[in-house]
Image (spheres, rainbow, N blue to C red):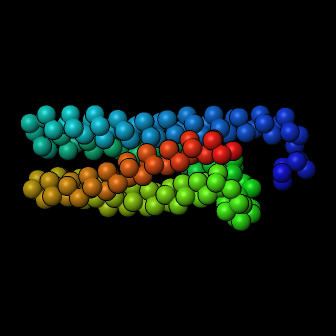
């Protein structure tokens, strides 16, 4: 290992355990929060009779969740890169084992998920809030249908990524 020159194996193990703990807790918050919003909050919000109030509520929750999404996604990427530094330094390792191939596949899906998620949230999220403030509720409904498709794609990618990352433990 590249770190052998700097730290001992026991120090490496402790560092890895700390990084893994941060990674897992961030994943729980990021993925669990996303599933909560998708499966519980969003469907329950349809029981609200006032569309403008519903949109404001989802906007407030979305704004608050965005902070935690950004924080946990940043931690996931940082800790993920630190735990897989050997692959980053030597990309040919991705294709020398099943675990490496799974990791490579997960990383490609992570990039796609981040682009879809942030593209959808930045573009459609701001548009929905603006149109809602202007009282253009019919346009908001149309855009919501599109944004829900992107959100569903993001959720599917999240689940596939988690399954790929968990399956890596079988091959490592």
Instruction: Say which residue appears at 33% left-offset and 43% top-offset.
Output: 62
Q: Residue at x 75, y 38 (%)?
A: 15
User: Who's the residue at 53% across and 48% down the image?
Assistant: 164
Choose between 8 and 127: the one closer to the eye.
8
Q: Is residue 20 above or below residue 154?
A: above
Image quadrant in which you'd find residue 124: bottom left
Q: Nearer the viewer, residue 50 or 28?
A: 28
Tell me: 117 left or right of 28.
left
Describe residue 158's horizontal placement relative to residue 121 as left or right: right
Q: Is residue 155 visible?
A: yes
* Residue 4: x %, y % from top left: 88, 48
Q: Residue at x 71, y 34 (%)?
A: 17
Q: Position of residue 138 (x, y in %)?
A: 9, 56
Q: Is residue 68 visible?
A: no
Give x and y (percent) for residue 30.
46, 41
Q: Using the image, determine if residue 96 lies above or below residue 14.
A: below
Give the total of numbered labels.
Answer: 0
Tell which residue pokes out farthest to the bottom in this image: 92
Horizontal placement of 163 versus 66: left or right?
right
Quadrant location, the C terminus: top right
Identify whether 72 is placed above or below 150: above
How far across and down, in percent of the image, does residue 49 sit?
8, 36
């Amino acid at each position: 290992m590249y770190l052998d020159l700097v730290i001992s194996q026991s120090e490496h193990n402790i560092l890895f355990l700390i990084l893994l703990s941060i990674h897992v807790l961030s994943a729980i918050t990021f993925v669990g929060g996303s599933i909560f919003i998708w499966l519980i909050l969003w469907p329950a919000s349809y029981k609200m009779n006032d569309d403008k109030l519903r949109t404001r509520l989802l906007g407030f929750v979305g704004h608050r969740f965005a902070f935690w999404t950004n924080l946990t996604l940043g931690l996931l990427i940082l800790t993920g890169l630190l735990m897989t530094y050997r692959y980053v330094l030597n990309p040919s390792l991705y294709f020398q084992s099943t675990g490496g191939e799974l990791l490579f596949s997960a990383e490609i899906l992570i990039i796609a998920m981040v682009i879809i998620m942030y593209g959808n949230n930045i573009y459609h999220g701001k548009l929905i809030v603006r149109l809602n403030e202007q009282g253009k509720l019919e346009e908001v409904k149309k855009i919501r249908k599109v944004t829900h498709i992107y959100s569903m794609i993001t959720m599917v990618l999240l689940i596939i990524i988690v399954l790929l990352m968990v399956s890596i433990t079988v091959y490592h």
